[in-house]
Image (cartoon, grey):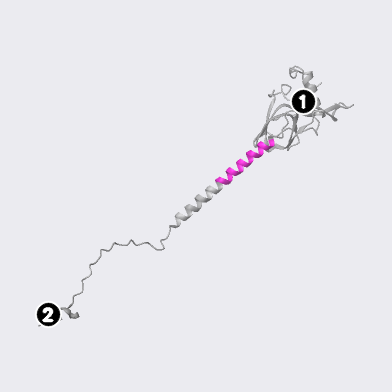
Amino acid sequence: MDFRQLNSNPANKQEPVPVAQPQHPVAKRGVGTAVPKWLNLMSVAVLFGVAVLLLLLSVLFARGNTNDNEFKYVSSTQYQAVFLNNGQVYFGNVKALNGKYIDLVNVHYLTQNATTNASGQQQASGDYTLVKLGCQQIHSPTDRMLINRDQVTFWENIKGDGKVAKSIEEFKKQNPKGPNCDEQTSQTPAENAPSQASKNSTTTQNSQTTTNPR
């Protein structure tokens, strides 16, 4: 037998057996996992709260800047007139101004004079008296007034050559130590005299005892 033919026969040739390679497990990913509804609602609520907080902070910041910008218009060399929404007017020096109040010192206000007619009745005249806030009033307030900002219609600087500014300066010259608290006269305001300010602000009633500047 020819062994060479046997060995060369393709049918008798053995193929190598492939060695199996180790396989690593592949992690499975979830597809289309649903998010709980309550979690979505909580996320929306948190985002809404943050947006509202940022809006409030922006408003407060803008309001603060507005007050600062407004105070720069207060003239330190002039008097200011503060007009309330009930018709009363106060004069003095604005020392502070913000969204809550106006700090007014050296306060004066106007009262309308009254005259007595032939029948002994008092009637309004066309003259006004500038009254200094202080010991002339029955409750003796200090010379400082914090006026609630929501009671203020507007305020303005007044010129030094105006009647009110001149009257204030004249009163200061005649009373260098302040008003004489021993000199008091009763004055009945006319019906169309400025009304008293709201209870929400520091006020002076025109019907109280006052002293007229000389």
Question: What is the x, y in percent for residue 83?
Answer: 74, 35
Residue that mark 2 sits on = 3
In the depicted structure, whether residue 57 falls above or below residue 169:
below
Disc 2 marks which amino acid? Phe
Q: Residue at x 80, y 22 (%)?
A: 170
Residue furthest to the right:
118
Q: Quadrant of residue 104?
A: top right
Q: Where does the image place residue 185, in percent across and percent down from the top left?
A: 78, 21
Find out whether residue 65 is within the magenta segment: yes
Number of callouts: 2
Q: Which residues are magenta?
A: 53-70
- Which quadrant of the view contains residue 195? top right
Residue highlighted by disc 1? 131
Per the image, is 54 magenta? yes
What mark, if any, has residue 74 been given in the picture?
none
* Quadrant location of the N terminus in the rendered image: bottom left
Q: Would you say residue 112 is visible in this rendering?
A: no
Tell me how far mark 1 sits from mark 2, CA to CA: 144 Å
Residue 171 placement (x, y as % from top left): 79, 22
In this view, the residue in front, 129 or 26, is: 26
In this view of the protein, which residue sits in the foreground, 24 or 70? 24
Tell me: 96 left or right of 56. right
